[in-house]
Image: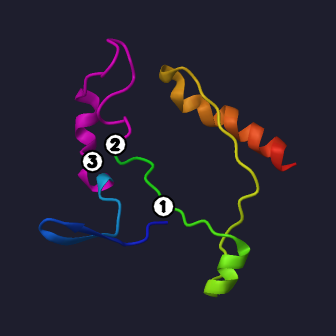
Amino acid sequence: EIVPVTIKTRKGEKVVSEDEEYKRVNFEKFGTLRTAFQKDGTVTAGNASTLNDGAAALVLMTAQAAAKLNVTPLARVVTFADAACAPIDFPESPSYAVPKAMKQAG
């Protein structure tokens, strides 16, 4: 879910209210893009993550703070886990962290 965010810049304020990256795609160029890291690789400028990929914001507070502010929690953090891989294998890290978190959650 994307929530509008107002950013103050030197030129004034800018409201970011949608992911604009998908509008910039030219699918006709995909087949002509060279691979980025290996001659016979699969990563190109067309399928690699953009610099803003994964941006998020989260507000955490205690139940007491939520009651004091008269806000209704939308979720509850039950547990968390992390995992690391070699840099080349970074997309695999969640596949190690999720089972750890699920085990901790019971």
Dot 1 amino acid type: Ala
Position of residue 77 relative to residue 52, above or below, is below
- Pointer 2 local density, CA inside 10 Å: few below 14, some 14–19, many at least 20: few
Q: Is 47 one of the magenta-colored residues?
A: yes
Residue appearing at x 61%, y 85% in the figure? 69
Give the number of the mark in front: 3 or 2: 2
Residue appearing at x 48%, y 61% in the figure? 57
Give the number of the mark in front: 3 or 1: 1
The picture places residue 19, in percent across and down from the top left corner, at 35, 60
The prevailing secondary structure element of the residues shown in magenta is loop
| Side of 41 relative to 36 (left or right) | right
| Side of 68 relative to 44 (left or right) | right
Q: Which residues are magenta?
A: 22-50
Position of residue 17 relative to residue 71, above or below, is above
Corner quadrant of residue 42 = top left
Corner quadrant of residue 85 = top right
Give the number of the mark in front: 2 or 1: 1
Numbered disc 2: secondary structure: loop
Reading the image, the residue beneath label 1 is 57
Dot 2 amino acid type: Thr
Outermost residue on the left side: it is 11
Dot 3 amino acid type: Val
Numbered disc 1: secondary structure: loop
Residue appearing at x 69%, y 41% in the figure? 81
Which numbered tag is attached to residue 50? 2
Towards the viewer: 60 or 23: 60
The picture places residue 8, in percent across and down from the top left corner, at 24, 69
- Pointer 3 local density, CA inside 10 Å: few below 14, some 14–19, many at least 20: few
Residue appearing at x 37%, y 35% in the figure? 48
